[in-house]
Image: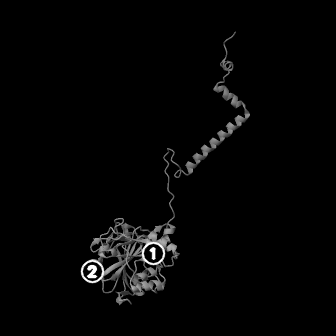
């Protein structure tokens, strides 16, 4: 017998097939060939599609060991109607929210002022100044200490059609809030948006705080108006820092009491004004940020004493009409006039020499309101 069998015959004799034979048998079947061809074509197309995807969208793909960086899609930005800064659409159109913030020595350093778009400062009583901090594009989780309303602060939030947060007020202010339809967020009627910070070792009247998000929620629950109806100021493009030649380095405002006197130092590196109170840097305690302003406005209004129907002493300020003003921006001083046609109209500022309405730098603006018996210097 011839035992010199081929390898294939050995497999047949043994009753087992090699992998090579199995592959030949598989490929001999037409259906198997078609399935294999289709799978190969699909794999080739998938590979081509993947390569094309990374070629076109290489900055948005998943990093598969290649040097592929994911690029964030930049959201479209819009100019805030309140302060001209570039923010999201929702923030640009957010309804103004005014919060009364006290400036008693025991209230310092305050919380949340660095996030305000506009801050009005004026004497409330007894030579003590108080702020109306107006918020819009920026939020602040803690603002305060919050104090009571006065009529002229009501005038300023009224011209913005804004929500108004405060802790009570004198008789005339509370009467005015009701009579003119201010969108009121008084702490007494809306306690859920306010709390006391008992960690501060001061008397209780200096411990009330609030949160802009909580106030906006209450305004929404009350179905207060959200459409802005105020006339925005015009905002300009800031000049190149290299082109600025500052003529004014320091602004000093005498409110008649050394504890409340204010000064600003011009900082050419940021084209902004660094605020000081009672000779010390003014700082937001929440973020340790120096209070800075892109524009400083000094507005002179007539002021006279008054007594309310329940015998409270206070002041009346003539916020409607016209008068003198000075605007500081870009290291320079602009002699100006202010004009407010009626109780609901916006206070506007005009260049005294040209008559043109003043354009502001985008960012925070402080409006320092003084009476003719007070003074300021700029040098």
Which residue ends up furthest to the top in the rendered image?
A: 1
Q: Residue at x 43, y 73 (%)?
A: 191
Percent position of residue 235, x then y: 45, 74
Q: Residue at x 31, y 76 (%)?
A: 104
Residue wearing tag 1 = 190
User: Dot 2 lies on which element?
Assistant: loop
Residue nearest the viewer, comparing 187 with 132:
187
The label number, if any, that marks residue 244 in the structure image: none
In the image, is residue 168 above or below residue 273? below
Badge 2 or badge 1: first in the primary sequence: 1
Residue wearing tag 2 = 257
Q: Which scheme is used to colour this image of the protein?
A: one colour
Percent position of residue 144, x then y: 37, 72
| Residue 24, visible in the rendered structure | yes
In the image, is residue 318 above or below residue 130? below
**Quadrant into which the N terminus falls:** top right
Percent position of residue 327, x then y: 37, 78
User: Dot 1 lies on which element?
Assistant: loop
Which residue ends up furthest to the right in the rendered image?
A: 30
Nearer to us of marks 2 and 1 is 1
**Quadrant into which the C terminus falls:** bottom left
Percent position of residue 50, x then y: 58, 46
**Relative horizontal placement of residue 276, taking residue 38 as reference (left or right):** left
Q: Residues within 10 Å of mark 2 (few under 14, many from 20)?
A: few
């Amino acid at each position: 017998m011839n035992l010199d069998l081929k390898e294939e015959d050995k497999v047949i004799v043994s009753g087992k097939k090699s992998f090579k034979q199995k592959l030949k048998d598989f490929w001999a079947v037409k259906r198997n060939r078609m399935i294999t061809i289709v799978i190969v074509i699909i794999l080739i197309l998938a590979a081509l599609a993947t390569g094309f995807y990374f070629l076109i969208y290489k900055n948005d793909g998943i990093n598969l060991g290649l040097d592929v960086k994911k690029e964030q899609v930049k959201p479209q930005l819009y100019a805030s109607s309140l302060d001209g800064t570039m923010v999201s659409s929702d923030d640009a159109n957010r309804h103004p929210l005014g919060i009364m913030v006290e400036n008693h020595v025991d209230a310092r350093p305050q919380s949340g002022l660095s996030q305000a778009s506009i801050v009005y400062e004026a004497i409330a009583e007894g030579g003590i100044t108080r702020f109306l901090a107006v918020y819009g594009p920026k939020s602040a989780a803690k603002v305060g200490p919050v104090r009571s309303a006065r009529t002229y602060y009501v005038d300023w939030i009224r011209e913005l059609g804004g929500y108004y947060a405060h802790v009570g007020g004198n008789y005339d202010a509370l009467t005015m809030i009701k009579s003119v339809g201010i969108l009121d967020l008084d702490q007494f009627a809306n306690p859920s948006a306010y709390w006391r910070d008992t960690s501060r070792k001061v008397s209780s009247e200096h411990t009330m705080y609030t949160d802009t998000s909580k106030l906006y929620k209450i305004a929404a629950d009350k179905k207060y108006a959200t459409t802005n109806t105020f006339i925005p100021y015009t905002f300009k493009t800031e000049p190149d820092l290299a082109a600025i030649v500052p003529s004014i380095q320091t602004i000093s405002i005498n409110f008649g009491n050394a504890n409340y006197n204010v000064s600003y130092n011009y900082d050419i590196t940021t084209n902004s004004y660094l605020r000081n109170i009672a000779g010390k840097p003014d700082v937001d305690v929440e973020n340790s940020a120096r209070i800075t302003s892109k524009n400083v406005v000094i507005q002179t209004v007539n002021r006279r004493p008054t007594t309310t129907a329940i015998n409270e002493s206070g002041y009346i300020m003539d916020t409607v009409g016209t008068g003198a003003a000075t605007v500081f921006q870009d290291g320079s001083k602009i002699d100006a006039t202010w004009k407010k046609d009626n109780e609901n109209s916006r206070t506007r500022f005009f260049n005294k020499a040209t008559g043109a309405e003043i354009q502001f730098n985008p960012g925070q603006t402080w409006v320092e309101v003084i009476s003719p018996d007070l003074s300021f210097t700029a040098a």
